Amino acid sequence: MVTNMNHISRISVFIQVVKHTSFVGAARALGMTGPAISKQVKALEDQLGVKLLTRTTRHVALTEEGAIYFDRARKALEDLSEAEQHIQELKAVPAGKLKISAPTSFGNQFLTKPIATFAARYPDVELDVDFSDRRVDVIREGYDLVVRVGVLEDSTLIASKLASCPLVLCASQTLIEQYGPLTSAEQLPRYPGLVYNQHSQKEEWRFQKANGEIQTQTLNRNFAANTADMQLEACLTGVGIALLPIFTVYPYLESGELIKILPEYKTYPESGIYVLYPQNRYLATRTRLFIDSLKAASKNFSWC
């Protein structure tokens, strides 16, 4: 089998074509021309004696043999990259690019200072920070780690919990005075509700009673927003009842500006704040140190 550097280069080109599902996308990513990309893939197919891709004018797709080869080849190149990275970091201070994503509201409130402190401490690490409520594809979009708030989902990613983050049903004193106090969950549809409309969020509150019984109650959707900040402001103004993460409402519950509704019930399932990152046998030093810095910062979260 051919194992020279040209062969490895062709494999890298092939992997980029598959990731971008086109020769044009791969060419743009690698800084090459489309014909050069096509030539490299054709040479790889000739070496292997199989067709790896089916081509149309706008799209490429893996053949059965191509899918098998892509899976193995990608893993092999990742192993090589990890080994090289490990060697470099053993002899130097943490360096390289670190691409991270975090929810907008939580990031702005609690991560800006830890991230800036980390950047000052490790100037050779190039940070690429994305505060967005969009649910990024960690692997496909090349993120080293993401911070997510919510219920931990089944995933191939490794998760490390930073803190608990219960969702709190709350309202302003003005709203309660206008509509009267709530004494049961069944009364919720009588009150205007503020709904988070990202990630297919439903207008429902699922909660657990003290006896362990789990129930669901529909909120009366009167106002929808795609950020916790907008929901919070509407809630403080008396627009409606909101189900918000504790990090957003904690100061206002403490000051009395917001009231916790039906405090004897707990939102179910439990919500938390997590760092998630891809499964690699070797975790880059810069990634490990960054996770450690977030864990240290989480010890100062006011609600914990």
Image (tube, grey):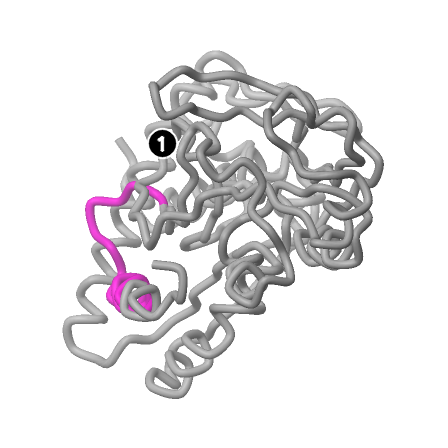
Does 23 appear above or below 90?
A: above
Q: What residue type is labelled 1?
A: Thr
Does 188 appear above or below 241?
A: above
Corner quadrant of residue 190: top right
Disc 1 secondary structure class:
loop
As drawn, is 113 to the left or to the right of 38? Answer: left
In which quadrant will I find the C terminus?
A: bottom left
Q: Residue 25: x, y in percent? A: 68, 45
Does 14 appear above or below 49?
A: below
As drawn, is 163 to the left or to the right of 104? Answer: left
Does 184 appear above or below 231?
A: above
Question: Which residue is at the front of the view, 87 or 42?
Answer: 87
Q: Residue at x 66, y 52 (%)?
A: 228
Dot 1 crowding, Cα within 10 Å, few <14, some 14–19, many 20+? few
Extent of the magenta region: 278-294
Q: Residue at x 56, y 33 (%)?
A: 18
As drawn, is 187 to the left or to the right of 97? Answer: right
Query: Is residue 292 within the magenta segment?
Result: yes
Q: Residue 153: x, y in percent? A: 42, 30
Q: Residue 265: x, y in percent? A: 46, 31
Query: Is residue 205 within the magenta segment?
Result: no
Question: Which residue is at the front of the view, 273 or 293?
Answer: 273
Q: Residue at x 41, y 75 (%)?
A: 114
Q: Residue at x 47, y 69 (%)?
A: 111
In which quadrant will I find the N terminus?
A: top left
Q: Residue 184: x, y in percent? A: 59, 25
Question: Which residue is at the front of the view, 42 or 69?
Answer: 69
Q: Name the residue under label 1.
A: 156
* Residue found at the far top of this picture: 64
